[in-house]
Image (spheres, grey):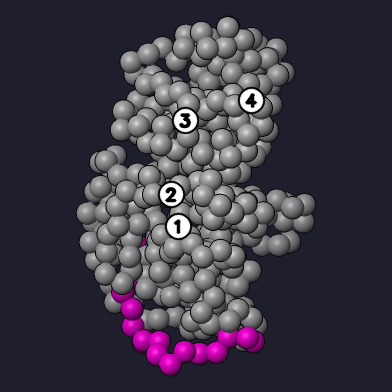
């Protein structure tokens, strides 16, 4: 065991806790947990909240599918190692990010280099096989799920590596070098996808959304063309730009069923499509033969990050200045002010919101 116990770890801490099916979380004083076996106690330096956390906050039907009460929310987490269980070997003071997909290591997917889609997956911040999450002053994570930082990123940047990793995974599957890329949806992951596509050698990145503010952010994140599809017919715009051929690469990040349904018609024959957004309604493709089967297209979906390949690549993009997180991180709130943080996220006026557990 390489780590040693620091001089002062308090007995109690502040945390957000989901204890029942009511809307919201409890801001509570709870015991600081003790790491056992290969577990590591980390001091949480920053935690980011994302769109999926709104479901947990409201406790809607989707929340009942993806989470289990009781739990502490916050799956986008950056921290510092302060204490280890007897089988962990990370030095105190190590800066880490949390891979929130807790893979089993034994199923078919884990044994075939696909731990991110483990059959028996637990999820940090969702109450799946662990009650812990990042919205607390300290949290417990088994050592194998911690990504040890290699560059001097800020805690805020480190926390946001998780959604950046989703975007990286999606764009990497598209093989964008030398291609034009359409990114549908300019939430945080979509905005990151635009920067990653440019960094991976895309020729032109086209961003589409229905919100002008987000489209302005898209320009800052590297989009060459922006299209407000509320004001402009997206299919006609794409047809005009491609001389009727269609897009070679599409990354669908909106999760809006109408956009997912229609994006197949925007692809050229032999094109590639990655689905990232989470549709809430059944999908229906009008012209299956013409838009899917006869196009011989390649469809990929993503759930998380390649462990730990994506983390290394995403961190390097930020460290090298190829992805600027300053445009994405819109607000920072103290954890005691979490209700206003969630109100800002729900309003759509924020982009990436950071919570500081120590305020």
Tag 1 near tag 2, CB within 8 Å: yes
Residue at label 2?
325
Is 158 one of the magenta-colored residues? no
The number of numbered badges drawn on the structure is 4
Q: Mark 1: which secondary structure? A: helix
Residue at the spot 66% in from the left edge and 21% down from the top edge: 271
Residue at label 4?
179
The numbered mark, 1 or 2, whose residue comes first in the sequence reads 1
The quarter of the picture where the N terminus appears is bottom right
Residue at the spot 25% in from the left edge and 47% down from the top edge: 344
The numbered mark, 3 or 1, whose residue comes first in the sequence reads 1
The numbered mark, 3 or 2, whose residue comes first in the sequence reads 3
Residue at label 1?
157
What range is drawn magenta here? 1-20
- In the image, taking residue 135 as reference, residue 96 lies left or right, namely right
Question: Which SS does the magenta portion mostly show?
Answer: loop
- In the image, taking residue 119 as reference, residue 44 lies left or right, namely left
3D distance between C-alphas at marks 4 and 3: 14 Å
3D distance between C-alphas at marks 3 and 1: 21 Å
Residue at label 3?
223
Q: Position of residue 270 (x, y in %)?
A: 70, 19
Residue at the spot 59% in from the left edge and 54% down from the top edge: 316
The quarter of the picture where the C terminus appears is bottom left
The numbered mark, 4 or 3, whose residue comes first in the sequence reads 4
């Amino acid at each position: 065991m390489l780590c040693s116990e620091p001089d002062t770890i308090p007995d109690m801490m502040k945390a957000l806790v989901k204890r029942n099916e009511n809307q919201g979380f409890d801001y509570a004083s709870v015991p600081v947990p003790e790491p056992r076996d290969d577990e590591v106690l980390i001091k949480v330096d920053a935690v980011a909240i994302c769109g999926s956390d709104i479901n947990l906050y409201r406790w809607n039907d989707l929340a009942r599918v993806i989470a289990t009460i009781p739990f502490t929310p916050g799956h986008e987490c950056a921290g510092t190692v302060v204490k280890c269980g007897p089988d962990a070997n990370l030095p105190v003071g190590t800066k880490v990010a949390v891979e929130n997909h807790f893979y089993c290591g034994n199923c078919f997917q884990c044994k075939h280099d696909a731990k991110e889609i483990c059959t028996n997956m637990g999820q940090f911040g969702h109450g799946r096989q662990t009650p812990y999450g990042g919205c607390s002053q300290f949290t417990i994570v088994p050592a194998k799920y911690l990504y040890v930082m290699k560059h001097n990123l800020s805690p805020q940047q480190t926390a946001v590596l998780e959604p950046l990793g989703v975007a990286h995974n999606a764009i990497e599957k598209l093989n964008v070098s030398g291609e034009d890329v359409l990114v549908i949806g300019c939430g945080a992951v979509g905005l990151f996808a635009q920067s990653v596509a440019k960094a991976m050698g895309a020729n032109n990145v086209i961003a589409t959304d229905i919100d002008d503010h987000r489209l302005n952010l898209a320009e800052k994140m590297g989009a060459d063309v922006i299209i407000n599809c509320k004001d402009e017919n997206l299919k006609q715009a794409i047809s005009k730009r491609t001389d009727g051929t269609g897009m070679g690469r599409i990354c669908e990040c909106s999760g809006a069923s109408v956009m997912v349904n229609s994006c197949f018609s925007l692809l050229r024959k032999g094109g590639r499509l990655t689905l990232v957004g989470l549709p809430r309604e059944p999908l229906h493709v009008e012209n299956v033969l013409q838009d899917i089967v006869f196009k011989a297209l390649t469809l990929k979906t993503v759930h998380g990050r390649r462990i730990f390949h994506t983390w290394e690549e995403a961190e390097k993009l930020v460290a090298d200045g190829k992805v600027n997180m300053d445009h994405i991180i819109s607000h920072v709130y103290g954890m005691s002010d979490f209700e206003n943080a969630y109100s800002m996220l729900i309003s759509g006026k924020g982009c990436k919101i950071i919570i500081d557990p120590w305020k």
